[in-house]
Amino acid sequence: MNFQKVRLSAGLYFVGVPIGTARDITLRALDVLASADTLAAEDTRSLRRLMDIHGVPLDGRKIIALHDHSSQGAIEKLMERIGAGQSVAYASEAGMPMIADPGFEIAGAAQKAGYSLTSAPGPSAVVTALVLAGLPTDAFFFAGFMPNAKSARQAAMEKIKDIPGTLVFYESPKRLAAFLSDAALVLGADRRAVVCRELTKKFEETRRDTLQNLAQYYDGHAVKGEIVVVIDRGRSEKISSSGLQEDLQAALGAHSMRDAVDLVAKAHQMPRRQVYQLALALTKG
């Protein structure tokens, strides 16, 4: 046994569970699952299986089902238990609750009632894909699942195409080729992207290319499994050197060199080092 029973105060505990490999669970998550007075889960069978793998006994506890289709009564029952001094642990089927998974309703109910809400954090497909993609992570936007309909999907992409950060999406295998085709059309055919499939599992796969090339590849290759698509931020094709210089001179007149370089590099979506070299040339001249 790699867990220990601990005394938990009354409240709601979100538990992060593996997105694939069962051994990715944290020791603290096991402690919470072993110690909570009440267990709730998006998928009761998957949580029971995970607990069996790690030797965490139910000790007479029943796992309460709580998912998108649960009644308000299920949430009220859990709130009553917290109100009676119990600790309630909730786990999604995979990953972290609330990250494209249920949890919002029960979190809101607990906060409204003034109950404690904390988390035993664990794996997340979003963060795992960002790490493997190798694209900038200083700023990113998680868009979740795009709409099913083509027109609605393209409209949704139009709204986020200029966000100055890496874009992260969840997608189903059946819609992957259509998603990539729309992304190439709306976001730019040459925009770099990475398709991550079956993260942490036996058949994990990561494919990097332009959106256009990825769309063409997956149009002819059927895939299975859980998929995360990571897309590089938009970058200006052409930048006016005179406009850059004017902006930099204005910034240098109002800020320190460091702050001016930071502001202009972000505004023009350029490497800071390149803008810094130009700033040095301007100040020396």
Image (tube, rainbow, N blue to C red):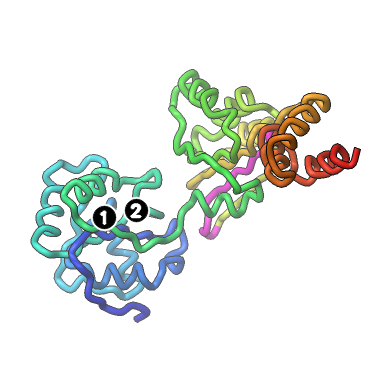
Q: Is residue 198 magenta?
A: yes
Q: Is residue 20 above or below residue 68?
A: below
- Determine whether the residue tagged by mark 2 lies in a helix, strand or loop: loop
- Residue 102 in percent (x, y) is at 31, 46
Residue underneath mark 2: 93
Q: Is residue 54 magenta?
A: no
In the image, 137: left or right of 111? right
- Residue 214 in percent (x, y) is at 66, 36
The residue located at (46%, 63%) in the rendering is 21
The residue located at (48%, 25%) in the rendering is 156
Which quadrant of the view contains residue 51?
bottom left
Q: Is residue 127 above or below residue 182?
A: below
Residue 261, can we see it?
yes
Q: 118 or 71, which lies in front? A: 118
Residue 213, can we see it?
no
In the image, 65: left or right of 211? left
Query: Which of pointers 2 and 1 lies earlier in the amino acid sequence?
Result: 1
Q: 223 or 272, which lies in front? A: 272
Q: Which residues are magenta?
A: 190-202
Identity, as a three-letter code, of the amino acid under mark 2: Glu
Task: Tell me the tag on residue 41.
Answer: 1
The outermost residue toward the front is 253
- Residue 165 in percent (x, y) is at 59, 39
- Residue 201 in percent (x, y) is at 51, 58
